[in-house]
Amino acid sequence: MTPADWWHVIDLPDGSATPGGWDLRGVSRQLPWPELAGKRCLDVGTADGFWAFEMERRGAADVLATDLASPFQARARERFEHVREVLGSGVRYEERDVFDIEGEFDVVFVGYVLQMVRDPVGALEHLRAVCSGHLLLLETVSMPLMLVPAPLARLDARGDGREWFVFNPRGLRTAVELAGWTVEEQRRVREGAGPLPEAQRASRSWKYRLGARGRSCALRATASGEETRLFGRTG
Ligand SMILES: C[S@@+](CC[C@H](N)C(=O)[O-])C[C@H]1O[C@@H](n2cnc3c(N)ncnc32)[C@H](O)[C@@H]1O
């Protein structure tokens, strides 16, 4: 596999790392992790699997990685399987849209997936139904929309049809609360680009490189407590 193929930077046992465009190792150190030791964990939209392997590394008892059946993910799945083998990992994999996930989990991780889902509140609501513990959400938030003191989201965040929404931090929190979760903590985190191949680097716009397109925000919520959802399924 060539560097351009890899999505995530993932540490390997021989001291090397996969040459991905996204180095989330520093992001991981900034997250408000819930207790993972002995827990059943779910990684939604795993791509190459960085967060799934990270939860296993941090002591999770069982990790299920899920992602779509798509041409992008078919290639990512090969990389995932390669890393799983090299790590001797026990992380399981299932091809699933977020709305089709079944089971019961103590911790649900959702990294940069919400922006790609047409009904993000519905997705969060579905995940609450399969989680008895914590949600850890990592998502891009809009810098311009941060200036407005209201819970907001903008459609077609990149203007190229690849993302449905980008929220401001209040909007992200409100979406989570409307889906029935209780937010415990929310914080901004600094993103980490990996050793990008030149072609990929050039394709990232000036807005992206200057951070004007978005910043990352992490949020930990619990499924326990009163449901705060205000609306019925049909709105
Ligand atoms: C930007 S990547 C993020 C990958 C990884 N979670 C991370 O934090 O780096 C978004 C991932 O979400 C997946 N995805 C998009 N829509 C999805 C859906 N409806 N259900 C599950 N996964 C989805 C994509 O296939 C892709 O792997």
Image (spheres, grey):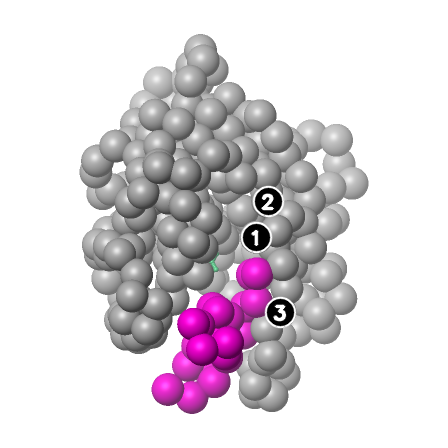
Around disc 3, counting alpha carbons within 10 Å, would you say few (fewer than 14), some (14 to 19), or many (20 or more)? some
Overall secondary structure of the magenta section:
loop
Residue 90 lies within the magenta run: no
The residue wearing badge 1 is 28
> Viewed as shown, does residue 213 lie left or right of 194?
right
* x and y, in percent, of residue 147 in the image: 78, 40
Residue ID for mark 2: 31
Counting residues from the start of the chain, the first of labels 3 and 1 encountered is: 1
**Is 28 located above or below residue 201 in the figure?**
above
Name above or below for residue 134 compared with residue 86: above
How far from the left and from the top, in percent, is residue 150? 69, 30
Q: Which residue is mark 3?
A: 193
User: Which residue is found at the position 50% from the left and 79% from the top?
Assistant: 16
Over which residues does the magenta segment extend?
Answer: 1-25
Residue at 54% from the left image edge and 34% from the top image edge: 220
Label 1 residue SS: helix
Task: Please tell me how crowded label 1 is: few (under 14), some (14-19), or many (20+) other residues with Cα within 10 Å.
Answer: some
The answer to whether one can see residue 72 in this image is no
